Each structure stands twice: as structure tokens, then as C-alpha cells.
């Protein structure tokens, strides 16, 4: 699901800090040892584990295309299959897509903690709430943390050590209290946390945000950096909102060309620093339409990642592809 517009409408008042902010003098990419003005990119696939089609799409995008990172929704039914894949391919950059919502109409999941432990996260059907707003309305920060810990525990019990944390539908960036727990767990477990906290050029342009709010985010970045974790300079999450012309949704070649063109535009707009570009690559089968109407968008993402033209563009633009695993390794070596 799209996160940027939703999460940022809430998140940019996250954790009000009293420290006076200063303009970042260098990008986090430079601090991690990349060349000055380098454009470093994580091509990240959300929603692994959600369905068979989601798993296949993520794997195709990473093994047959240029995507190089993904994250897994631990409460979902196809998690075991994807974790089995990760065990066979241990160098895959895979994090936890920490999940507090269950947004589809007929295909749903419940919190791993159980209703008795986290009643505020459970809707009348016994599943997670469909919207971020409902989670904010009904759930406490303690319940949120309990469920996050349950998802982390399941991953680790299965032998899956995540390379990073991020947040499904932006829920963990929806209130300062939720974000505080999200960041706390990242620091406690020394696992990188997806929060756009550097220059935030793309976000600022898209949302027309005041500088004061961006400065608050930058302070969160300094907190994570000082804890020994790598952080992002920017986040690109527009792909879910690219409206696909109705006449091409069933034509794979035209769908691929359309989505590839959009990604090329986005890549050419990147500013120096580390940017995470989010997508939802899915190898849609006939059954996926029973889950969601987003199939063409998700299939288009997968096809774009597999398009040789996109790979050529990355090379032509001098983009450096990086993973969360690599960023963490570089942070260990970087000067404080």
C-alpha cells in the first residue's frame, strides 16, 4: 500500500526534540564513505510473505532484475515459504515490514500477539484494523511495541535475522509515541530503521513541507547515527500513485514500458545521498485479483525492475546500488 503521503501527514511532527537543528553539511552517503555527491539507491520491494504472488514477484525483481532489497510481513500466511527461500539465499537483503494493519477486504491476517495481549490492534473481525487511522484511534504504544516484538521474535525463531526494519503503510510513523517505540527497538537491537531523515528533497518537494518539520526529522537521524546505525537521506515512494492508463493494464509490454519510464524519471530526479525507492513487485496470477485490485500496479513494478532499459539507465546516471546490509557494514567502519 502507498505510505508516503499518509505517513508523512502524521510523521513529520514525530518526537519533538529540544536540540537546535543545523543544516546537514554532508550527506549520509558521504559519511558512510561513498564519493562526494554520490547518488546511492536502495531498490526496495515491500510485502514479501503476503501471498505466493508477492513472494514470486519479489524474487523475480531481485534475481532477474535490479531490485536489491525487500522486507517481509511476518503475520501473513506465505511467510514460511519466503523464509525458506532466504535460508537458501542468505545474502538476500531482507528486513521486516513491521505490520499493524490488514487492509484488504477478503484476505486478512491477525496480530501474532493474539487478541488478549493486544486488543487495541484487533478489529471486530478479529484481524488487524484496515486503516492507519483506526490503529491510531484504538491501539496504545505499549500494544504496538508488544506486537512489533512478537514479529521480530517470530522471524528470529525461524532463523531469519532481518537486515533492517520498515513499516507497512507507515503506521509506525503515524504518531510520536509509535515512532518512539520503532526507533527504540532499532537502537536496542542494533538493526537499521527506515526513516527518511537527511535532506529529504523528494519528500519536501512532494509534500511542500515547512523546514521546521524537516529539521525535526533530521534530529531523529542524528539520534540513530549516534547509536551506530546507518540512515537515509531521502525516500521515494510515489510508484503506487502512478495512474496506469486503462488501455494498457492487460498488455505486459506496454505496462512495462510505462512503469519503466516512470522509474527512469524518478531515478533522474534523485539528489546526492542515500535514497530508498519503494515498490511492490508482484507476479500476479488469476487469484491475486481476489486479494487486491492493485495487481497491474504491482505487476508493472516487477516488469520495470526486469527491464534492461532500467539497468542501462542506472549505469548511465552513475547510480550506486546499495543494500541495508552494506550500509550497516559501512556504518561500523565509519567515523563517528
Image (tube, rainbow, N blue to C red):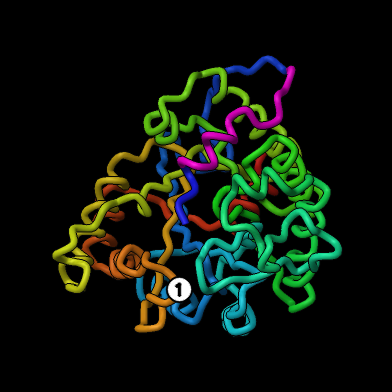
Residue 1, compared with residue 136, is above or below; it is below
Q: Tell me where the magenta segment starts and ends, as one range.
A: 5-18
Answer left or right for 298 relative to 51: left
For image coordinates 44% across by 34% down, the residue present is 203
Q: Position of residue 272 (x, y in %)?
A: 41, 36
Q: Give the labeled residue for mark 1.
A: 291
Residue 172, compared with residue 197, is above or below; it is below
Answer left or right for 75 relative to 250: right
Query: Where, quadrant-wise, is the C terminus in this rendering?
Result: top right
Residue 132, compared with residue 66, is above or below; it is above
Q: Judge whether residue 236 is colored magenta.
A: no
For image coordinates 68% across by 60% down, the residue present is 123
Q: Which of 27 and 153 lies nearest the eye of the viewer?
A: 153
Q: Position of residue 139 (x, y in %)?
A: 74, 49
Using the rendered view, name the quadrant where residue 50 is placed: bottom right
Q: Judge whether residue 11 is colored magenta.
A: yes
Answer left or right for 306 relative to 96: left
For image coordinates 78% across by 45% down, the residue present is 141
Amino acid at each position: 500500500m502507498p505510505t508516503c503521503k499518509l505517513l508523512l501527514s502524521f510523521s513529520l511532527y514525530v518526537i519533538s526534540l529540544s536540540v537546535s537543528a543545523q543544516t546537514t553539511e554532508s550527506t549520509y552517503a558521504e559519511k558512510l564513505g561513498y564519493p562526494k555527491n554520490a547518488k546511492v539507491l536502495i531498490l526496495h520491494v515491500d510485502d514479501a510473505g503476503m501471498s505466493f504472488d508477492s513472494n514470486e514477484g519479489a524474487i523475480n525483481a531481485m534475481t532477474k532484475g535490479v531490485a536489491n532489497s525487500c522486507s517481509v510481513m511476518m503475520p501473513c500466511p506465505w511467510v514460511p515459504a519466503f523464509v525458506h527461500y532466504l535460508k537458501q539465499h542468505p545474502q538476500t537483503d531482507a528486513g521486516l515490514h513491521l505490520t499493524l494493519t490488514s487492509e484488504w477486504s477478503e484476505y486478512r491476517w491477525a496480530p501474532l500477539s493474539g487478541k488478549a495481549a493486544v486488543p487495541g490492534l484487533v478489529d471486530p473481525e478479529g484481524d488487524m484494523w484496515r486503516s492507519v487511522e483506526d490503529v491510531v484511534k484504538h491501539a496504545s504504544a505499549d500494544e504496538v511495541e508488544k506486537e512489533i516484538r512478537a514479529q521480530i521474535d517470530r522471524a528470529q525463531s525461524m532463523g531469519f535475522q532481518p537486515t533492517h526494519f520498515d513499516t507497512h503503510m507507515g503506521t509506525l510513523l503515524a504518531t510520536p509515541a509509535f515512532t518512539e517505540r520503532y526507533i527504540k527497538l532499532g537502537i536496542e537491537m542494533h538493526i537499521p530503521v527506515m526513516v527518511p531523515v537527511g535532506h529529504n528533497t523528494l519528500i519536501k518537494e512532494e509534500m511542500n513541507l515547512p523546514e521546521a518539520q524537516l529539521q525535526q526529522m533530521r534530529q531523529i537521524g542524528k539520534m540513530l547515527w549516534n547509536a551506530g546505525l546507518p540512515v537515509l537521506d531521502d525516500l521515494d515512494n510515489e510508484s503506487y500513485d502512478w495512474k496506469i492508463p486503462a488501455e494498457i493494464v492487460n498488455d505486459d509490454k506496454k505496462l512495462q514500458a510505462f512503469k519503466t519510464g516512470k522509474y527512469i524519471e524518478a531515478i533522474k530526479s534523485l539528489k546526492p545521498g542515500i535514497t530508498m525507492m519503494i515498490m511492490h513487485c508482484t507476479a500476479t496470477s488469476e487469484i491475486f485479483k481476489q486479494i487486491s485490485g492493485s495487481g497491474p500496479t504491482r505487476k508493472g513494478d516487477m516488469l520495470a525492475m526486469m527491464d534492461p532499459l532500467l539497468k542501462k539507465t542506472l549505469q548511465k546516471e552513475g547510480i550506486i546500488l546499495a543494500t541495508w546490509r552494506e550500509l550497516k557494514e559501512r556504518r561500523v567502519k565509519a567515523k563517528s
